[in-house]
Image: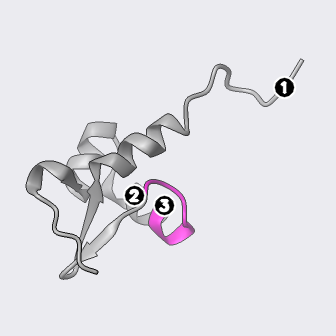
Amino acid sequence: MTTILSKDEYMTERALAEMWGLKRNTLQKWRSAGVGPKFLKRVGRIVYRKQDIAEFEQNNIFQRTTSDKR
């Protein structure tokens, strides 16, 4: 099954890196490590669905910087 995304449903690697203040290299490393938001490969291009970006952000909300559970 092929999913057709309109341009307002996805972001390019460059746009996401800019939005998050990251280098594109960081997103590339995350993909290799299997971390970060889900992504699609479209004719050799990497794109991220906005719903997956939102889900990743939602799953990475923290109240403290340490893992101390006192």
Q: Is residue 2 depicted above or below 26 in this figure?
A: below
The kind of residue tagged 1 is Asp
> What's the CA distance linking mark 3 and mark 1?
26 Å
> Whole-percent x and y of residue 65?
67, 25
Kindly identify which residue carries mark 1. Answer: 68
* Residues at marks 2 and 3 touching, judged by CB atoms closer than 8 Å: yes
Q: Is residue 6 depicted above or below 44 in this figure?
A: above
| Secondary structure of the residue carrying numbered label 3 | helix
| Secondary structure of the residue carrying numbered label 2 | helix
> What's the CA distance linking mark 2 and mark 3?
5 Å
Residue 66 appears in which quarter of the rendering?
top right
* Residues at marks 3 and 1 touching, judged by CB atoms closer than 8 Å: no
Q: Residue at x 21, y 52 (%)?
A: 11
Numbered circle sitting on residue 46: none
| Left or right: 36, with 28 as reference point | right
Q: Residue at x 23, y 78 (%)?
A: 2
Kindly identify which residue carries mark 2. Answer: 27
Numbered circle sitting on residue 30: 3
Seen from this angle, which residue lies furthest right? 70
Q: Quadrant of the C terminus?
A: top right
Magenta part of the chain = 30-37
The kind of residue tagged 3 is Trp
| Left or right: 32, with 10 as reference point | right
The kind of residue tagged 2 is Leu
How packed mark 2 is, by other alpha carbons closer than 10 Å (few <14, some 14-19, many 20 or more), is some
Seen from this angle, which residue lies furthest front? 1
